[in-house]
Image: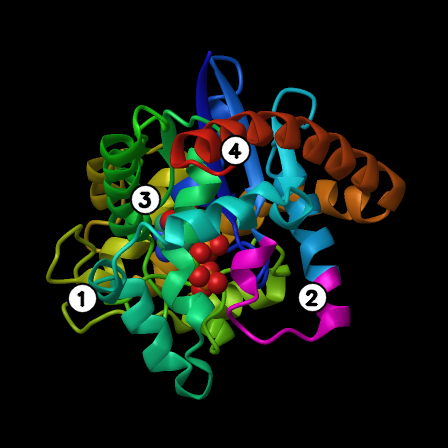
Amino acid sequence: KKVIFSGAQPTGTLTLGNYLGAIQNWKSFEDDFQCIYSIVDLHSLTIRTNPEEFKESCLSMLAQYLACGINPDKNIVFFQSHVPQHSELAWILNCNTYMGELNRMTQFKDKSANHKDNINAGLFAYPALQAADILLYKTNLVPVGQDQKQHLELARDIATRFNNNYGETFVVPEIYTPKLGAKIMSLQNPNVKMSKSDENPNAYISILDDEKNLIKKMKRAVTDNEGVIRYSDEQPGIKNLITIYSKLTGLQIEEIENKYEGKGYGHLKTDLAEIVVESLNPIQTTYNKYMNAPDYLQEVYTKGADKAKELAEDTMKKVKNNIGLV
Ligand code: ATP
Ligand code: MG
């Protein structure tokens, strides 16, 4: 079976962007691929943590994965920090990644602009750790949102260069992004992507938001003065709402445009809020069930790490041998 690897950071709760851009797809691969889904907790350390809250966020993220339908009996689900090979390979890849390459990364530029008080080396080297995550498992396909495209290209460059320098070591991974929904935009600024770590909670829809909040956030979503419900680059706010609508209902863009012809934005927002509430309701119920089963969660992440370690160690042996470590 071909291998799929992906992950999300436990920096908050999953947003509709994470769900529609990535996690919803993960489930669709489980029968045809060996799927490995990590909660990339080490990546989150680029932001200072509150230890108690962080621990809770990590466990919550695992429950969110399961609630989104990731079946731990069919997929390998684990915490990145439980498999030390990630850090180990990251160092080796750091030594095979150029400062100039990392300097070009837009995520680093964006995140360092937003956290001027804590521009740490981890934030800079983040894509090398991400490359390690992927390359450890001989990954063929990485299902992610549009924002990760640049990092994926770098991971491919790192793998190719390493193979050229030290002999065939890594599988060079391909990226997979969905045709629609690969970049869900912020509800407060439809020119930037929705992010779970956005300091303004009105900018994102969390899959755990309650009904009242969902309706409020949808109502406040920034649109425009055109007054026409049309899927167009000139109306990024409305375009974003139509995208979410289409992804959640399965209706085609055109069907939605027709349905709302001559109607106001308020109408679209009210309907969409209801659709979001109904879509998230079963996820939230399942989430609560898992959060009340800490022993089960522990069993899932322990088993997941055991399986992941075995696969990761196989690659590490090869890497160490090829690079000349005794
Ligand atoms: P953070 O702000 O902490 O970086 P994030 O929302 O970007 O949070 P990540 O954990 O970095 O979430 O990414 C998890 C997955 O979700 C990745 O595959 C990423 O490409 C995807 N993703 C993130 N934001 C969006 C978005 N707005 N639309 C579609 N996919 C997204
Ligand atoms: Mg991100």
Is 40 placed above or below 102 here? Answer: above
**Disc 2 and disc 3: Cα gap in Å?**
28 Å
Direction bottom: furthest residue: 117
Task: Give the x, y percent position of residue 40.
Answer: 56, 50
User: Does the residue tagged 3 have its C-beta within 8 Å of any atom of ligand 1?
Assistant: yes
Q: Secondary structure at mark 3?
A: loop
* Magenta highlight range: 41-55
- Give the structural element (helix, strand or loop) at label 2: helix
Based on the picture, tell me whether residue 251 belongs to the magenta stretch. no
Q: Which residue is mark 2?
A: 54
Secondary element at tag 4: helix
Q: Which residue is mark 4?
A: 316
Q: Nearer the viewer, mark 2 or mark 3?
A: 2
Q: Are marks 4 and 2 in contact (CB under 8 Å)?
A: no
Label 2 vs 3, first from the N-terminus: 2
Q: Nearer the viewer, residue 221 or 41?
A: 41
Q: State which tag comes first along the sequence, 3 or 1.
A: 3
Amino acid type, mark 3? Gly
187 and 87: which one is in front? 87
Q: Label for residue 181?
A: 3
| Proximity of marks 2 and 1: CB atoms separated by less than 8 Å | no
Residue 281 horizontal/vertical position (percent): 64, 46
Q: Nearer the viewer, mark 1 or mark 4?
A: 4
The residue that disc 1 covers is: 227
Circle number at residue 118: none
Position above or below: 163 against 295: above
> In 3D space, how far apart are the residues under numbered discs 4 and 2 (Cα atoms)?
29 Å
Residue pushed farthest front?
326
Does 42 appear in magenta? Answer: yes
